[in-house]
Image (spheres, grey):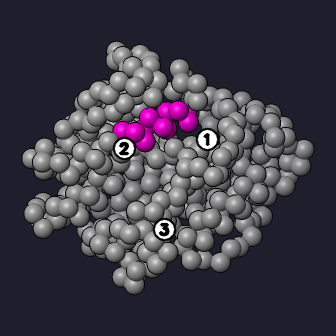
Amino acid sequence: MADEHHTHTQHRHHHRNRGKKHPVIKWVVGIVLVLLVAIGGYAYYLYSSVQHTVDKTYTPLKKNNGSGTTALKYKKPVSIALLGTDTGDLGRTETRGRTDTIIIITLNPEMKKTTMTSIPRDTMAQMVGESGVQIQKINAAYNFGGADMAIDSISSLVNVPINYYALVNMGGLTKVVDAVGGVDVTPTLSFKYSGYTFTKGKTVHMDGDKALAYSRMRYDDPNNDYGRQTRQRQIIMSILKAAPSFQSLANFKKLLSSVESNLKTNMSFSDMTQLFTNYRAAANNVKEDHMQGVGANILNASYQVTSTKELQRVSDEIRSNLGLKQETISNEETKQNALNPNFNWNGTNSTGYTVHSDNSN
């Protein structure tokens, strides 16, 4: 099924390297972590200001079963879906937009381990909550049905429960960088983009606009989107280094203001403080991963389709850190895979994948 909502680009098939950390952390992680640093580091200094900000970002899901709050209370593993939407970014004006950044985070305080699994934005997935079989790119779920459909679709895709979500508007990221006084970054390659010049190996202090430009360039990077993710990770780490500084403290209210207008989450102030207090050891041991897809042209749209084997691997990894037993994954995506026995899973841009709309049972 074609995704008429997006600009379709062809994706390269990248060699997977499971032994190394993958550069999947995107801007969305930075905003949330900066908020957590703010809460943990300054809560007793500006407690009421922080709580007021968090209260404004609180947006519960329709299905609020309290599983996350219970898990935090008893210091059990929790899962968080980080979603980065593009409304307001680069002049876009959609009401909801697409979640081009999707990362599933699990924190296990007993194992003192955190996993961060990136889901490619063009991953073929069922839109859970739509009538019949609605197959689209996973980043369209939020546009179609808000945070509820996005979380339900992501959860179904990898067969894992999602306790919390954090939705960040990418259009406000420049404000976060400016609020921490800018960031120092050493470019990984030389290039020009959006009026800025970057020189490989030459450390430069960047304001919000320059940092955004540095992190957004993709097509001139030999590693394409993966190279962009590496640069985005640099910005995030630089934000975290700058956040505890005196200059950041002086701009604390400015930082809170930028977060307040660009974050929605079903995590309450109490949830966040418990997360920071009881899960810090887990956050110090992070394992990064990504779900690897294969490029496919489906009805003239560029998708990433994920093999059943890869879906199972990702599900097992995430469930393991949540302390859950492994389960054989069986969902609409695996059913569609079974109906495409001749698809070339070793290809880089295959065209023989067909979505069967009548496979609703």
| In this rendering, the label closer to the viewer, 3 or 2 | 3
Which residue corresponds to the image point at 27% horizontal and 29% vertical from the top-left?
Answer: 206
Q: Which residues are magenta?
A: 225-235
Residue 152 in view, yes or no: yes
Q: Which mark is residue 351?
A: none
| Residue that mark 3 sits on | 113
Horizontally, is 224 left or right of 273 in the view? right
The percent coordinates of residue 195 (x first, y second) are 34, 15
- Determine whether the residue tagged by mark 3 lies in a helix, strand or loop: strand
Point out the residue furthest to the front here.
201
Q: Earlier in the sequence, mark 1 or mark 2?
A: 1
Which of the 4 quarters of the picture holds residue 7? top right
Does the magenta portion include 163? Answer: no
Total numbered circles = 3
Q: Is residue 245 above or below residue 79?
A: above
Relative side of 209 to 222, left or right: left
> Mark 1 highlights which residue?
122
Where does label 2 land, which residue? 236
